[in-house]
Amino acid sequence: MKRTIKSQTVEVTRKIVGERLGKLRCDNNLTQEGLAQIMDVSRLTVYKWESGKNWPTPPHLAKLAELYECSMDYLVLGIEDRGRDNEEDQIDLSLLNRISNMIKGYVLYAHALLVYSWLVCIL
């Protein structure tokens, strides 16, 4: 996938993003196991991100950006700064975390409804 940002053409592939994530991890003296513990995922998940087999989810990208003190734009697109300040990034991170928690709540609610409807059918 190619995107044009501020008259730059940026190629975004899982492999390129994975290489960037691996370099940032090594630059921060972290092992895949250590990063997995910080991110609350398995080491295999970190391996898949870095090898380009999977994309990190948006909440994971936000947490990686916070950990590595960079923007999500840099993680995905390789663009260092787009004129945003840290306060605005913190607001975005907070909003992203709230949205993620809301989605988790809706999933739990849907599971509870499914179990409840199943119980009603049995009784």
Image (cartoon, helix red, strand yellow):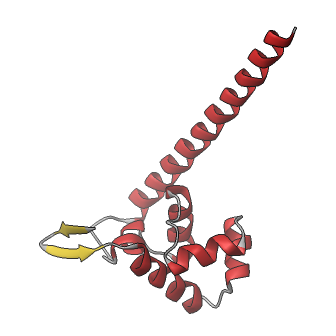
> Residue 14: x and y, percent?
43, 73
Is 28 placed above or below 74 here?
A: below
Quadrant housing the C terminus: top right
> Residue 91: x and y, percent?
45, 52
Is 63 placed above or below 26 here?
A: above
Where is residue 29, by image quadrant? bottom right
> Residue 56: x and y, percent?
53, 64
Q: Farthest residue in the front direction?
A: 122
> Residue 22: x and y, percent?
53, 85
Q: Farthest residue in the right direction?
A: 123
Left or right of 2: which side holds 85? right
At a point 50% along the width and 70% down the height, the residue shown is 65
Left or right of 13: which side holds 21? right
At a point 42% along the width and 67% down the height, the residue shown is 72
Q: Nearer the viewer, residue 40 or 18?
A: 18
Q: Nearer the viewer, residue 38 or 95?
A: 38
